[in-house]
Structure formats: structure tokens, C-alpha cells
Amino acid sequence: AVPLVVAKSTALSAKHGLLIKNRTAFENARKITTIVFDKTGTLTVGKFEVSKVVSLDKDIKENELIRLASALEQKSEHPIATGILKKVKELKLPIPEAGNFKAITGQGVEAIVEGKKLLVVSPGYLTENKLTLPDGFTANDTETVVFVLIDQKLVGYIALSDEIRPESADAIKTLKAENIKSILLTGDNTKVAASVSKTLGMDTFIAEVLPHEKLEKIKELQSKGEFVAMTGDGVNDAPALAQADIGIAVGSGSDIAAETAGIVLVNSNPKDIVSLILFGKATYRKMI
Ligand code: ADP
Ligand code: MG
């Protein structure tokens, strides 16, 4: 006979978009006290749309700015890159070649384009490198902003917007009813993180985190006695996913994240985590 747990976890996979790779992860789901969520693609839809392109250099037009940025982004798989490329294709701008491409982990991308060193980076990169944010810089609370630098000079920025998934608020609410805390952990800027966390009624948020800081944050929660589940999609999330008591890889993410995690969230839907926990609780309640 098929053990009950196997039967249950198989049913979960089929019905709720969960791939349970490690049965202990399913068994332990009922012990979760805190869930650390990544933002893009899990709590949000993960499809960025360019909402604004601003040039800070009178010699560079908006279209030229986004065209240059797209040269770097064609080499990146970040959802921000996808959003920028979509816009450039709509504008029918020719995308230049990029050489010496390098991803700056958790902060952006750099490459040589048309003989110049280009960077497309986060606000955190600017502050870390003592570059001041531009005068009159405005972004709505819900917008992600990336800055364009040519030869280390700030020449403009691109604002992008993403939408909260319709299922997210309900998922967080149910977790709260189960006495499970939800924390937003993101590399995106503080304004965006605060807005998403507030809209969804989450317990707290941690923004502008670098990949190695994600791992530290999980350890810190565990040292406070929390039993931590974490969602993540990137290569950069793998160490933190491995550290978490339950690592949940988001379906559309990297293979490395999926290999590290005990559970794969096939449809990237936070509601499926709620199903996992409720199903786990119900299963083991019956068995004990
Ligand atoms: P998260 O997974 O929480 O979105 P990431 O570590 O992937 O965080 O990214 C953090 C930040 O680094 C982004 O919000 C953005 O500012 C910057 N960034 C990362 N990749 C890119 C990219 N390809 N182009 C521009 N900016 C990027
Ligand atoms: Mg990510």
C-alpha cells in the first residue's frame, strides 16, 4: 500500500501546484512559525512594465537611454531586464551589442557598450558608491527604479511597475489566522517593499538586501526560535533556501534554487503555500 503521506503529498502536487521533493519538508510544514517571502514573481506577478524613462543629461534622449540600457539587459534574466527589453522592442529601437557583461549580484548589471562602460543599477548601488540620487528624483511608492551610469556618471533612470498578485492578500491573511508571521525579504528598494508589505498586511519587511544578507537573516530568525520557511527563485537565493527549515523554490526560477529547495511552488502562487501548511496539519493531526 502507498503510505498515507506519499498519497497526500502526491495529491497536493496535482491539485495545488506543489512539487514535494523532500518528504520531510511536507512533514515539517505544520511546524512553520515564520515565512520569509521574496517579492517579485511570488507576491507580485513578476512582470515589470516600464512606466517612466528620465534622462538627466541634455545630450541623451530618453529613447537613447533605454536603448543603451537594453544592451546590458539582453544578457540578464532578471524580470527588470525582461520589462526593459519589452519596451525597447515596442519602440522598435535597435539593441546594441554589449561586451564584458557582468552581473553585480543583487545590485544590477554592467558591460561595455559602444566603447563606454555602462551600468544599470539599484538605488543601493548608488548610495554604496557615494553617488547622490538626482535632484527632483521622483518615483511612486510602488515603482522599482534602476539607474543608468555611463563611465561612472549618472545619466538617467528607468522606473518600472509590477502588480501584486490577486491571491497574495488572502494568503497572508490565512497565514496570520494560523499564527504564522510573514516577512518580505527583497533586493528591491525600501519604498516598494514598504508599500507591498503594508498593502498585504505582512508583519515586517527587509529591503535592499544583498544575497549573503538573505542567508544571515534566516539564521537570525532561527536563533530567535522561529521555524522558518523561505521562498526564492534566484541562484542567489540558494544558500538561504538551504539554510531555511523549509526551502520553497518558486517554479519559474533557476534550476539551482529548485535543486536546493525541499518544495517547488510550480505556479509561483503564495496560496499554494497555505494549502501545503493546512494539508500538512490535517494529515499529521489524523496520524498522531
Ligand atoms: P529580488 O530577487 O528581491 O528582486 P535581486 O537581488 O534580484 O532582488 O535584485 C535587487 C535589485 O538589484 C533590483 O531591485 C534592481 O535594482 C537591481 N538589479 C538586479 N538585476 C538587475 C538587472 N538585470 N538590471 C537592473 N537592475 C538589476
Ligand atoms: Mg530574485
Image (spheres, rainbow, N blue to C red):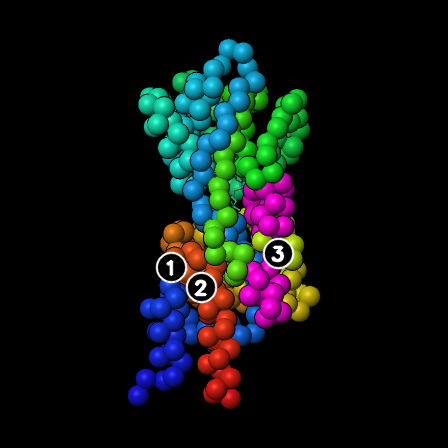
Can you see residue 208?
Answer: no
Cβ at disc 3 under 8 Å from ligand 1? no
Q: Is residue 61 magenta?
A: no
Query: Label 3: few (<14), some or many (≥20) within 10 Å?
Result: many
Residue 191 is marked as none
For label 3, the SS is loop
Can you see residue 250?
Answer: yes
Q: Is residue 71 above or below residue 183?
A: above
For label 1, the SS is loop
| Disc nearer the start of the sequence (1/2) | 1
Cβ at disc 1 under 8 Å from ligand 2? no
CA–CA distance between discs 1 and 2? 9 Å
| Disc nearer the start of the sequence (3/2) | 3
Name which residue type carries label 2: Asp
Q: Can you name the residue that lies furthest to the left here?
A: 1
Instruction: Please state the horizontal and vertical placement of residue 197, each as a whole percent of the image.
Output: 60, 51
Residue 266 is marked as 1
In the rendered view, does 125 fall on the left or right side of 42? right
